[in-house]
Amino acid sequence: MDAVSQLCPQCDPGRLYDDDLPLCPTHIIPLEPYAAEAATAPEPEPEPERQPAADRSVCWNCGTPVAHPGNTECLNPECRKSLTPPALVVRFPAGHVELGRDTRVELGRLGPHSALFRSYPNVSRHHAVIGTDPNGRAWIEPVPTPNGTFLDGVEIPASERRVLRQDTRIRFGLHAEGTVAVFSR
């Protein structure tokens, strides 16, 4: 798939076109480069404060009450997740990405989580890497891409690792948004 980083000044601002198109197919006027909303990059972040331990009285995923403290799996038949939460969960509209400690995964339209981004043509095939360190600290590192990676609405530079905090909003391109959940043990 071609890069999608041009827009028509008269079309919907969220509509992007392939780089190889010279004119808007609807208005027959020249397309303009899409400039991601750049904001001043914040200073490098300090170490995050420890996240509160997960509430063991309910399932971390669906909120179903835990019937017995010895249970290891959620009793909700539609959930059935382990009651031990992963170190990091990013919830996107099409599904979740879950990571244990000291793991990493690349997100984009290729790879193990490509189905989450299928309906977002301006998400690159290789958009960003998320991971956790051995202590459970979560992070994101954007891959160089024309459509940007954003934390709480602020674009972060490619190849610059940033710490992820509870309830941080991640956005790839214009519309692929997810919410971060970080669990400590």
Image (spheres, rainbow, N blue to C red):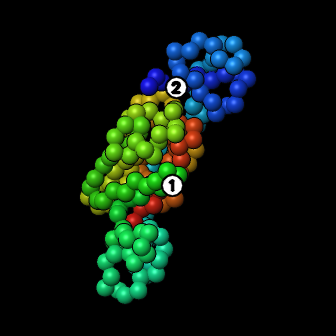
Q: Quadrant of the rendered structure where residue 99 is?
A: bottom left
Q: Quadrant of the rendered structure where residue 36 is?
A: top right
Cα–Cα gap, marks 2 and 1: 24 Å
> Can you identify the residue that label 2 sits on?
4
The percent coordinates of residue 71 (x first, y second) are 33, 82
Residue 60 as seen in the image, left or right of residue 84: right
> Which quarter of the image is occupied by the N terminus?
top left
Q: Amino acid at mark 1?
A: Thr
Of 148 and 177, which appears nearest the observer? 177
The circle on residue 138 is none
Of 41 and 136, which appears nearest the observer? 136
Q: Indicate which disc, 2 or 1, sits on the residue closer to the N terminus.
A: 2
The percent coordinates of residue 57 (x first, y second) are 43, 81
The percent coordinates of residue 113 (x first, y second) are 38, 46
Whether residue 69 is situated above or below residue 131 in the rendered picture: below
Q: How many marks?
A: 2
Residue 96 as seen in the image, left or right of residue 36: left
Whether residue 50 is visible here, answered yes or no, is no
> Can you identify the residue that label 1 sits on?
179
Depth-wise, is mark 2 or mark 1 nearer the camera? Answer: 2
Whether residue 90 is situated above or below residue 129 in the rendered picture: below
> Residue farthest to the bottom?
68
Secondary structure, mark 1, is strand
Residue at 73%, 23% in the rendered image? 10
Q: Quadrant of the rendered structure where residue 100 is?
A: bottom left
> Which quarter of the image is occupied by the C terminus?
bottom left
Q: Amino acid at mark 2?
A: Val
